[in-house]
Image (cartoon, rainbow, N blue to C red):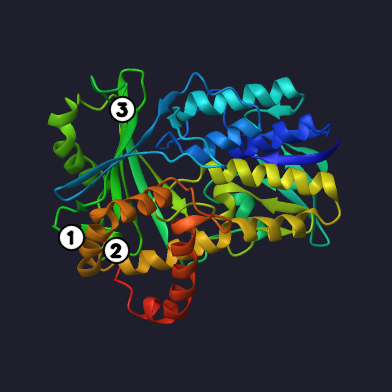
Amino acid sequence: MQFDIAVIGGGPGGSATAIAAARAGLRVVLCEKGPYGRDKVCGDGLTPRAIAALDDLNIDHSVAHRIDGLRMIAGKKQRELQWPTTSRFPHHGAVWPRQKFDNHLLDVAIAAGADVRFNAEAMPILEDDVVVGVEVNGEVVRASLVVLATGAQGAAAKMLGAVRDPDETFGLAIRAYAPTPRHAERHLEACLSLRDEHGTPVPGYGWMFPAGDGTVNIGVGALSTMKGFKKLNLNTLLDQYASIVREPWSLGEYIDKPRAWRLPMSCVRRHGRGWVAIGDAAGFVNPMNGEGIDYALESAMLAVSCFVSNPETAPVDYDRQVGERFDAFLRTGRRFSFIIGHPWLLKPGLRVAVGTQAAADITLAVMGNLIDSTTPGAAGRVMRFADNALRIADPLLRRTRAKA
């Protein structure tokens, strides 16, 4: 069978690719290795940037629980901020549990005319170093472009060299659902001052994401740059955080067993002849918050746009365009993670992050994925200054990084 685009993976990025391609009149097949209705472990939060991407895809998100801002907690300091109104992004986000969110996007892709296949684990087919399609359940499916939307860089990505840079930061996170009477709140909550069972400050945060359905998504995440990362017990860290928020949130017991996942934050190769990687498979995850759904949606649409413009040059054009949009901010975040991996730098850094309104506004923009190479104003200037400064300091940062 011959298609224009074959997509490996049925998460938000894969579905967005299929939706955009089908609506553009392309022949597209999406292969999801799991069954219809499978769950994906995630924090379930959608930033204003993700909402903007859903609007670009004409996706109805009215069923998701609306979120108007972020409550940041660092030690005894607490700030509750509204998402800003900008010319690019709306002033609200959402919480949409991934099982429902992913199924909705897959339904839209099917309705748009995409050939969506479940229980279908696909692998790229290489001919003379060119990807010419995929093999799925013993069937050869040829395509002019293969899109890797495989999440945290699985077997298909490894086959093409789309793997995490071992010298770069990555993250681990764990989440559970628990009942709470505060499930309908309109603010996410992020505790930036976590400590492990040994009292070591954790570069990461604990979150409470109210789902509006009687529950909250409670979780914690940590960066690999912290001291003692390899010995970090995520279940213990989650339980410690739950003990802190249990009383103010009237939190009940976990509804199900907590589930953990890895967050790739780099990729040594995100395109080649006949293929591109999008979303998590391309390492598009913000090191400061572990979020990547918005980047997955945007990179998916960019991949399809490049293919429509010129199928022959699409992989190279795509790599250039996503690089121009994302690379500076994500690179800065990875370098900054080496700094906050030192316990004696993390604490004063948190005081600065929420100490003044101006600093908190910039922290909010970072936590909301609202900054990239085109961001105007103070947040954009700070990002560009940090990118240049940390580029110069990068060799020292790597030499002095905390011992994992």
Of marks 3 and 2, which one's residue comes earlier in the chain?
Answer: 3
Q: Which residue is mark 1?
A: 200
Q: How far apart are labels 2 and 1 at the CA level? A: 9 Å
Q: How far apart are labels 3 and 2 at the CA level? A: 27 Å
The residue under the point 66% across, 23% down is 108
Going by the numbered disc 2, the residue's amino acid type is Met
Q: Which residue is mark 3?
A: 216
Name the secondary structure under disc 1. Answer: loop
Mark in the foreground, 3 or 2: 3
Label 3 packing within 10 angstroms: few (<14), some (14-19), many (20+): many
The residue under the point 31% across, 27% down is 216
Q: Position of residue 86 (x, y in %)?
A: 51, 42
Q: Looking at the image, is 158 positioned above or below residue 147? A: below
- The circle drawn on residue 226 is 2
Going by the numbered disc 3, the residue's amino acid type is Val
* Left or right side of 299 for 338: left
